[in-house]
Image: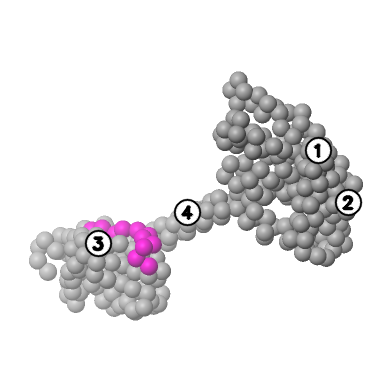
Amino acid sequence: MNAHDRALTGQNSLFEEVDFSSVEYMLERSTLRTLEPGETLLQPEVANYHLYLILEGELRVHLMGQETLEHASLVAGECTGEISLVDGQNPSALVVASKTTRVLAVPHDTVWSLVDQSHEVARNLLAIIAGRMRNDNSALITSHSKRAQYEHQATVDALTGVHNRRWMNDAFPRVLARCALDHVSSAIMVIDIDHFKHVNDSYGHLIGDVALKMLANIMQAHLRPHDLLVRYGGEEFAILLPDTGIEEARSIAERLRATVADNEVRKGELAFKITISIGIAPVGNGGKLEEYFGEADRALYRAKESGRNRVVVAD
């Protein structure tokens, strides 16, 4: 090992606060290796028997052996391969050179000899492993947070902030199954803004969006905590009322209808009122969700046909 490489090796985190001259002789069986950009150093399919001290260059760590899932970068003064060396298992990640990189490959038995010889080396190796685990835990937490965020975005309507139809297709059947086990009745409501096309044509789609958000806010404020509200599509919303008889559902629907009719849609100096029509279908302890929605939709159609701004219960 020439003087330049010796200096680089002594600066590695493995030898922090270590009298390198006292342990240098133990690295005689270590070998220098030069990696070209894109060359693989470690991979999950191949066992590892070395600790690699990075002298120059940069390595990229990719989780699960997928080059597109970059996890971290390792630079001169750091090392890699320590975890697989300690637990005796294959590497858990793919490590690839991102540029021309030189590493010192220290055999596993040499590593253990260094640990036996120097308490400082042992401490440094533990610190390296602990730091790697801490970083991996942080990455895992970040990954879970991002996944939760993506899942939330996938199931929530971006405009109104209420759940969307995708969420409904999972949540409604689960709640109905629980109601069936408890032998309680439920009801489904389908709500539609009256003459919504006229609102968009008269004021523009941005004002139509304001009307949709106002309606969603009113319903969220006046429904019970266990009621399930979704934007069913366009200007339509659906509500599942668990453990609710048909007369109670009618009362809830009438309260929503009247509250919406009493409020104004406001945007700047513009103010106007909207009304809604509601169709309700009772849900028993059997049948398919689509059938109940069909009944509620037919009731909604009759509400529209009979003058709008009203509540109609399915036969």
Q: Look at the image and tell me whether residue 265 can be seen.
A: yes
What residue is drawn where x is 24% and y is 67%?
38
Question: In the image, 6: left or right of 113?
Answer: left
- Check disc 2 and report the residue beneath it: 245
Question: In the image, 14: left or right of 291?
Answer: left
The image quadrant that residue 47 belongs to is bottom left
The image quadrant that residue 160 belongs to is top right
Disc 1 marks a residue whose amino acid type is: Gly
- Image quarter of the C terminus: bottom right
- Check disc 1 and report the residue beneath it: 307
Q: CA distance from mark 3 to mark 4?
A: 24 Å
The image quadrant that residue 6 belongs to is bottom left
Residue 11 vs 269, above or below: the answer is: below
Residues in magenta, as a range: 66-78
Question: In the image, 233: left or right of 183?
Answer: left
- Check disc 3 and report the residue beneath it: 98
Residue positioned most to the top: 269
Q: Nearer the viewer, mark 2 or mark 4?
A: 2
- Check disc 4 and report the residue beneath it: 142
Q: Earlier in the sequence, mark 2 or mark 3?
A: 3
Q: Secondary structure at mark 1?
A: loop
What residue is drawn where x is 14% and y is 64%?
5
Q: Earlier in the sequence, mark 1 or mark 2?
A: 2
Q: Secondary structure at mark 3?
A: loop
Q: Secondary structure at mark 4?
A: helix
Q: Secondary structure at mark 2?
A: loop
Q: Nearer the viewer, mark 1 or mark 2?
A: 1
Disc 2 marks a residue whose amino acid type is: Gly
